[in-house]
Image (spheres, rainbow, N blue to C red):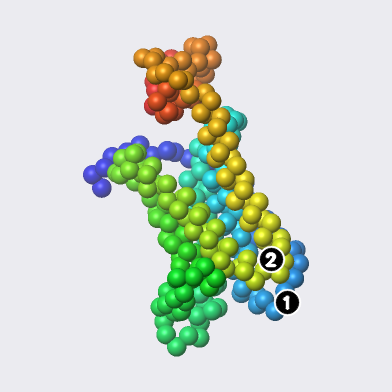
Amino acid sequence: MSVKYVPVQWNPNKWLYDAIMLAAVAAFLWVFLYLAPRHDPAISAQIHNARAFGACAFMMLTVILCIGPLARLDRRFLPLLYNRRHFGVMTALVALPHAGFIINWYYAFSSINKYVGLLGANASIGQVAGFPFELLGLFALICLLILAATSHDFWLKFLTPPVWKRLHYLVYAAYFAVVGHVALGILQDQRDHTVTALFLGGAAVVVALHLGAWWSESKDTPDTAGAWAKVAPTAAFREGYARIARLPGGDRVAVFLMEGQLSAI
């Protein structure tokens, strides 16, 4: 508690951001649960609920990983980047009911503890078909909960920005685990290809945007590193806003105009 920090205060943009996010999540779940046709009547209501929350969490995680490269490709997406931590916390909260529905359905009547059954029921680690995809889902959920728990400004100050940033690269590990969880799980016996199309399309968009952002920035990187890097003309700066540029070494810099003075991060 000896760590002192200045928290980022709530503002109208944050309220609007969260309101749109909550409305989108509610709309997705409502459509999945009540409007989308159920092609397999043998699926129980609890499993249908689990798939709704699981699909929503996957789409949210896909959007989260798309925001970064989109902001690097087009500055108009930067407002989505500023409050992305709220998006991550909500994704973890949506993923929790998915895990709860699955565990309470498949392991409710097990002779052993349901969590022990989850970890030990499938031991086919040495083969692709039948691989314990449940462990991949559990790993992804743990990663999301760690990211959500450390998203507060206190942890950014306490861990220091470099450590905090490296810790939050776990979002990529979580995404790859979710991809494996879905590919080895529901897609193995999926009769309706709607979920398959959403899954493959989302993963392809994430990969394509990251490759596009890398390619765009690699073309803008100078061949030789000089002592100075051009960011923008002084007339282009607006009070309270930043201009972002790529340095010769590959890092990005944000130059702010605050109270008539320029500062860089």
- Viewer-nearest residue: 144 or 118: 118
Residue shown at 53% from the left, 25% from the top: 219
Residue shown at 67% from the left, 76% from the top: 43
Residue wearing tag 2: 33
Residue placed farthest to the bottom in the image? 111
Q: Which of the two marks, 2 or 1, is nearer to us in this view?
A: 1
Quick one: label 2, few (<14), some, or many (20+) residues within 10 Å? some
Q: Quadrant of the C terminus?
A: top left
SS for callout 1: loop
SS for callout 2: helix
- Give left or right: position of 59 versus 264: right
Which numbered dot is residue 41? 1
Q: Quadrant of residue 17?
A: top right
Residue 120 seen in this snapshot: yes
The answer to whether residue 190 is above or below residue 147 is: below
Residue 213 percent location from the top left of the image: 55, 34
Residue shown at 62% from the left, 48% from the top: 204
Residue 19 seen in this snapshot: no
- Viewer-nearest residue: 28 or 190: 190
Residue 242 percent location from the top left of the image: 48, 24
The answer to whether residue 178 is above or below residue 168 is: below
Dot 1 amino acid type: Pro
- Viewer-nearest residue: 20 or 139: 139
Dot 2 amino acid type: Leu
Residue 184 percent location from the top left of the image: 56, 66
